[in-house]
Amino acid sequence: MIVVLGAGAIGRFFGEKLKQVGEVVSFIGRKDPIDTQQTDFVLVATKAYDTEEAIKRCKDLISDDTVVISLQNGLGNEEIISQYAQHVIGGVTSTGVMLVDGEVELKGIGETVIGDFKGTGAEKFLALLKKTDLPVRLSEDIGKDIYHKFLINVGLNALGAVAGAENGKMAENEYLRNIAQHLISEGITIGKAEGFTFENVFEGLMDVCKKTSGNRNSMYQDVLNGKKTEIDFLNGKIVELGKKHQINVPYNEAISSLVRARAGLNSWSKAL
């Protein structure tokens, strides 16, 4: 049995894909009652700021054999989950989905990558994902893959939200491309200080934007809907790590401040 924590677009998309190939899947939203029956897999697809609360609420579902998978944005989710589970899988996806009138709308298929972060279980869950029609692979270094996806989000999410730009427009507009390149460049510098090296990240962002051109990234969707954003786990995390390593990150500081400043304005959606 698979329990999906988080009833947003990503959680529902992957959960429904697994149901279509015969898996038993249940969905738990923020206000849903929790069954005490322990489960084989827990797929965490909540917002990053909800990770710990969601895991605490569902801790009775998790046995020593349960495999918990994070398919979320930002850094630090797997570390939080590892406090409550013996087997933790990190996961990243570039598939673009949106909720439109309560229904999941696919905007572009991208690769999904998973790997063992703590304990084991990635190969077992990969086998389930391979039963679907989604492109998936096993990571050789999930920590690096998570940071790489993090860099893509650093260049895309906050900027797209502030500019009111769908992914395709991010690739088309030279001013947005220039700012995105600076955001990512600062993230790469921080990554080096954290022990990671990367090449062609900006090109990867452009590829994602073109493949999911009609998608509004998750932070853009959040601000349109008046919801809390994940800025502290994305560009805000770059700022936090910049202070840790004494590295200046002015572009990420600026975009983080813009998102936080606009988050409290009732006129955000009207301004876009």
Image (cartoon, rainbow, N blue to C red):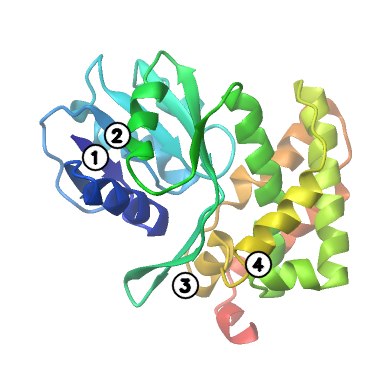
Report if the CB atoms under discs 2 and 4 are less than 8 Å apart. no
Three-letter amino acid code of the residue under disc 3: Asn
User: How far, Cα to Cα, is label 1 from label 3?
Assistant: 26 Å
Q: Nearer the viewer, mark 3 or mark 2?
A: 2
Report if the CB atoms under discs 4 and 1 are less than 8 Å apart. no
Q: Could you tell which of marks 1 and 3 lies nearer the N-terminus?
A: 1
Q: Could you tell which of marks 4 and 3 lies nearer the N-terminus?
A: 4
Q: Look at mark 1 in the image and give the residue it sits on.
A: 3
Q: Look at mark 3 in the image and give the residue it sits on.
A: 225
Residue sitting at x 55%, y 51%: 110
Residue 43 in the image: state x and y as whole percent: 34, 38
Looking at the picture, tell me which residue is in the foreground, 227 or 156: 156
Density class for disc 2 (Cα within 10 Å; few <14, some 14-19, many ≥20) is: many
Q: Tell me the SS state at disc 2.
A: strand
Density class for disc 1 (Cα within 10 Å; few <14, some 14-19, many ≥20) is: many
In the picture provided, is 61 more to the left or to the right than 68?
Answer: left
Q: Could you tell which of marks 2 and 4 lies nearer the N-terminus?
A: 2
| Relative height, residue 182 to residue 238 (above, below) | below
Three-letter amino acid code of the residue under disc 2: Val
Q: Look at mark 2 in the image and give the residue it sits on.
A: 42
Report if the CB atoms under discs 1 and 2 are less than 8 Å apart. yes
Three-letter amino acid code of the residue under disc 1: Val
Say which mark, if any, is on residue 167.
Answer: 4
Q: Tell me the SS state at disc 1.
A: strand
